[in-house]
Image (tube, rainbow, N blue to C red):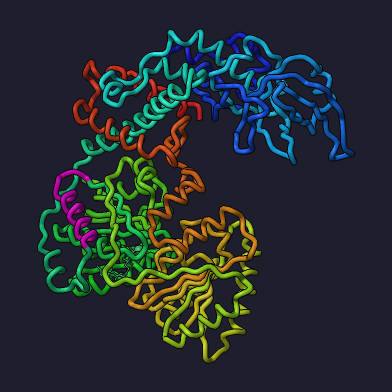
Amino acid sequence: MSGFFSTPIEYLKGVGPQKADLLKLELKLFTYGDLIQFYPFRYEDRTRFYRIAELDESLPHVQLRGHIRAMETIGEKSKKRLVAYFTDGSGELELVWFQAQKWVARQLKPGVQYVVFGKPSRFGSKYSIAHPEIELLSPQSERTGYLQPVYTSTEKLKIRGLDSKGISRLQEQLLALALEHIHETLPASLLALYSLMDKREAMRQIHFPSGNEQLQKARYRLKFEELFYIQLRLLTLKLSRTEKYRGQVFNDPALLTRFYTDHLPFDLTGAQKRVIKEIYADVRSGRQMNRLLQGDVGSGKTIVAFISTLLALGSGAQAALMAPTEILATQHYQGLKPFAKKMGLTIALLTGSTKTKTRRQIHEALESGHLHILAGTHALLEDPVQFQNLGMAIIDEQHRFGVAQRARLWQKNREYPPHVLVMTATPIPRTLAMTLYGDLDISIIDELPAGRKPIKTVHRYDSHRLRVFGFMKEQIALGRQIYVVYPLIEESEKLDLKDLMDGYESIARAFPQPQYQISIVHGRQRPDEKEWEMQRFIKGETHIMVATTVIEVGVNVPNASVMVIENAERFGLAQLHQLRGRVGRGADQSYCILMSDVKLSKEARIRIETMVRTNNGFEIADIDLKLRGPGDITGTQQSGLMDMTIADLTKDGEILKLARQAAIDVLENDPELNSAQNSNIKRQVDAQTKEVVNWSKIS
Ligand code: ADP
Ligand code: MG
């Protein structure tokens, strides 16, 4: 934005220092630019006047025209209210105020013509409107056929006259001054191709729509622009990285072929094969790979990871596999070890609890190149860990690692950065992935190994616990193992532990030793204790594992076929889905039992019903996105990227796809944005870059 838009907000007529301070404090509006981009969050329909006789309860807010016949205060104490009898000749309704009654009563005069706006509700045969908007009938208020913008305001602002209407008046002032400074920010070719409204008109229509159609076009245009520039930034980042970082070329498939022909334990699914092809194409291209691998729990990402390491190893490089927890890193290590052994490859595990001596040996073997594969936790990132030549870095469960940690892995290599494969089992809706991981290439395993039986999920109230115990006993008699999981909420760890211990006791009573053996795992245990309990379950020595959510991530016990989730209402959808994914890994029919209280919030009910209805991780992710909004889902605050003024990833997926494609097309033809045609884009990108730089200086 040009200089005009950096003008401090107090320069606007009608603002002044006091109001300016409030606007800054309450709404973070500092400049003209901030204010003009402070868009209404909804619009009220003032397109026509209704007659009282035609009201019905299905109507949203309506606009009426008439006069007050009489007023009175009725009721006692908290029921006390001011009622005005309002008529327009076709009938009568009651306007009701529970608050500020005296003040309202002083303002209103019987017999005078008013315009009233509000939502009618029906009591018996009569309609009433509680706390309506009311103003004198005037040429201005009588104007129909428009949509009234509604802006967010706060109590403090309202006292100073800056309610929604007050803000709208400021916008009117500002817009009159600003129009000539608003320049087109998209190239004419895109405006034409996507039938977008021009910028100036869009800014006018968003604040003062002349009709619904224009409003929709304005919103569409502004959303498109916002998403376009986010995508452009991400794609530019990706492009510059591709140019800056050469990748090692791994084009010797001998090792992979040997694994395929001699040791592959099952046929790969079509999706697994496709993803391996994508990875192979990357690592032989000469460019550094940065790829996100998404696959639902149980879709078989581990074998894909192993085959990826073979690509690097086949050309004499090393590979690392980093997981967020010790348990998971250990499991990966144990999962890969048999394959490595068969292939004559060396593999080691490095975690926080690796003994100093072993640690030193690992460091040496890594540097000399004798160690081929290193699995581990964050410990991999520590400084003494130096590879001879790290060719492939695989990061499991990305959402637990920050972008900064990803970057540190890169620096583990001297000449070339390693190829990076990020794996996540949390399906992310496409729209979100395009933004969060817009700088990565994305591969998706969207197919489960053949012969998997879908997990049967049911919802049971706590009062049916005995029946659930009965079912668990039947399953144990069939030789199966069972998880019972309790929620863990960090701020009340004590309480959770109590829940867990109470639960453990009731289970221990219902499943007495020596017939039944139980493992217990929770966050308060020492790592070795935890490990021991886990191992007993993994080896099949215990029938039931009672745990907090430490098992959420990645644990693989194919013989476990029942997942009981206690207080299921306290888990988010993504977490429930993750937990359920711990079962259904073997050939047996698996079950997930969601236990809850009878009383459930609306959202909790939707979550549980969704789980019962579907096993599809992407469908679940979509619903999760709608319930929670994008910020929450990722867990990490991706600075800046997710701050949008008008676009909404939960609703604007279609626009996002078009905007991303538009950005791809632009960069393909003109990566430096030097052509005259793209001068608008260039100007906007430069302005944004300046803004980012300024901010980085401030903070
Ligand atoms: P996730 O994607 O959750 O990491 P895993 O890699 O742990 O899934 O795989 C889950 C289970 O499915 C493992 O026991 C694995 O051996 C098995 N598996 C993976 N791919 C196949 C396949 N193509 N056919 C049969 N079983 C498979
Ligand atoms: Mg896994």
Q: Quadrant of the N terminus?
A: top left
The image shows residue 244 at horizontal and vertical percentages of: 23, 36
Q: Is residue 355 visible?
A: no
- In the image, is 398 to the left or to the right of 124? left
Between residue 529 and residue 186, name the one nearer to us. Answer: 186
Tell which residue pokes out farthest to the right in this image: 76
User: Which residue does the image show at 64% across and 32% down from the upper left?
Assistant: 55
Q: Is residue 560 visible?
A: yes
Residue 343 versus residue 408 in the image, above or below = below
Between residue 402 and residue 482, name the one nearer to us. Answer: 482
- Classify the position of ligand 2 by quadrant: top left, top right, bottom left or bottom right: bottom left
The image shows residue 469 at horizontal and vertical percentages of: 56, 80
Dominant secondary structure, magenta? helix
Between residue 478 and residue 461, name the one nearer to us. Answer: 461
The quarter of the displayed image where residue 320 is located: bottom left
Residue 686 versus residue 316 in the image, above or below = above
The image shows residue 537 at horizontal and vertical percentages of: 44, 79
Between residue 499 and residue 648, name the one nearer to us. Answer: 648
- In the image, is 243 to the left or to the right of 397? left
Judge whether residue 286 is colored magenta.
Answer: yes
Numbered-mark total? 0
Judge whether residue 171 is colored magenta.
Answer: no
Q: What span is in magenta?
A: 270-288
Tell which residue pokes out farthest to the bottom in this image: 514
